[in-house]
Amino acid sequence: MTNRERPGPKVLFVDDDPQQLRMAAFEMEAYGWSVATARSPIEAIAMMAEEAVDLAVLDYDMPMMNGCALAERLKSISSDLTIVLHSGATNIPRWEMSAVDACISKDDGLTRFLPQLTELVQHRLAGDAPEVPETGSSLLEHRS
């Protein structure tokens, strides 16, 4: 089965940088995922109120609301939503990431983590908590 034939999760990608949005949407769609994009936290909240998604990938540093605050709002809309912070920020306090399931550094890219993100979503949809491998600051589990 090729990546384009593989049914993938419905993803909401939120970043205030239009170039990041285009690049990430292209990578995830090439992997077989259905992707919706939002350029602001407010747009993301409105989208979540209208359609269900399996995974939200959020930038941290955005105007009006950071990615962790947005994660909390999105979890209040859909408590079983898998949320990944995709950020260049390196000093985010762990306590602030209580609604975040994993974190990927923008420096490490997104493409190489797509199989792990697929597994994370599949486990969440099945109702069990997977072991997320720690790879330095690249992909960290934040929820116990």
Image (spheres, rainbow, N blue to C red):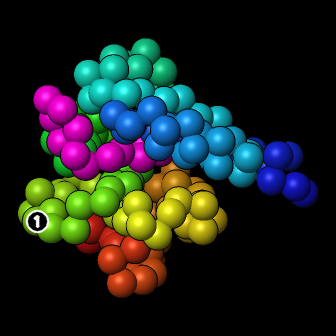
In percent of the image, x 60 and y 61: which residue is there?
Answer: 111
Give the side of residue 67 with respect to residue 10, left or right.
left
Which one is nearer the viewer's eye here, 116 or 89?
Answer: 89
Q: Which residue lies under the disc numbered 1?
A: 93
Secondary structure state at the residue bearing disc 1? loop
Q: Main secondary structure of the magenta part?
A: loop
Residue 103 location, quadrant: bottom left
Quadrant placement of the C terminus? bottom left
In percent of the image, x 11 and y 57: which residue is there?
Answer: 96
Quadrant placement of the N terminus? bottom right
The answer to whether residue 113 is above or below residue 78 is below
Give the side of residue 129 with respect to residue 67, left or right.
right
In percent of the image, x 33 and y 77: which residue is there?
Answer: 137
- x and y, in percent, of residue 83 in the image: 37, 50
Which one is nearer the viewer's eye here, 25 or 120?
Answer: 25
- x and y, in percent, of residue 46 in the image: 33, 17
